[in-house]
Image: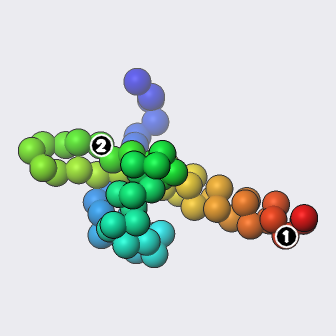
Amino acid sequence: MTSERQIIIKLPLVKEMTTLSRATIYRRMDENKFPKQIDLLGRAVAWVEQEVLDWIDERIEDRHENDKK
């Protein structure tokens, strides 16, 4: 267990942060290309904010690497 406080975020904010649709987010999760959700209670799910931010940072780094080629 981590000692840092983790922030969890719901799908509307994930969509806003990434500009991806719900379908794309779930498809990429199935392909292991996007952070997995956390099951909360019943049908409620959320994502760890830092994991989503890290995913965004990786996309930016990928762009920089592709620009160097």
What's the amino acid at mark 2?
Ile
Q: Residue at x 16, y 51 (%)?
A: 44
**Left or right: 2 in relation to 26:** right
Q: Earlier in the sequence, mark 1 or mark 2?
A: 2
Badge 2: few (under 14), some or many (20 or more) residues near its Cα, within 10 Å? some
Q: Residue at x 41, y 51 (%)?
A: 29
Q: Which residue is nearer to you in this view: 17 or 6? A: 17
Q: Find residue 12 and name its label.
A: none
Q: Is residue 4 left or right of 61 when viewed as pictured?
A: left
Q: Is residue 68 above or below residue 43?
A: below
The percent position of residue 22, horizontal first and vertical second, equals 32, 68
| Three-letter code for the amino acid on which mark 1 is drawn | Asp
Q: In terms of secondary structure, where does tag 1 sit?
A: helix
Q: Which mark is residue 67?
A: 1
Q: Residue at x 9, y 44 (%)?
A: 42
Residue 17: quarter of image: bottom left
Asked whether the viewer can see residue 1, the reply is yes
Image quadrant in which the C terminus is located: bottom right
Q: Can you say which quadrant of the picture contains the N terminus?
A: top left
Decide: is 58 above or below 15: above
Toward the top, the furthest residue is 1
Residue 64 position within the rendered picture, expressed as x and y whole percent measured from the top left: 80, 65
- Where does label 2 land, which residue? 38
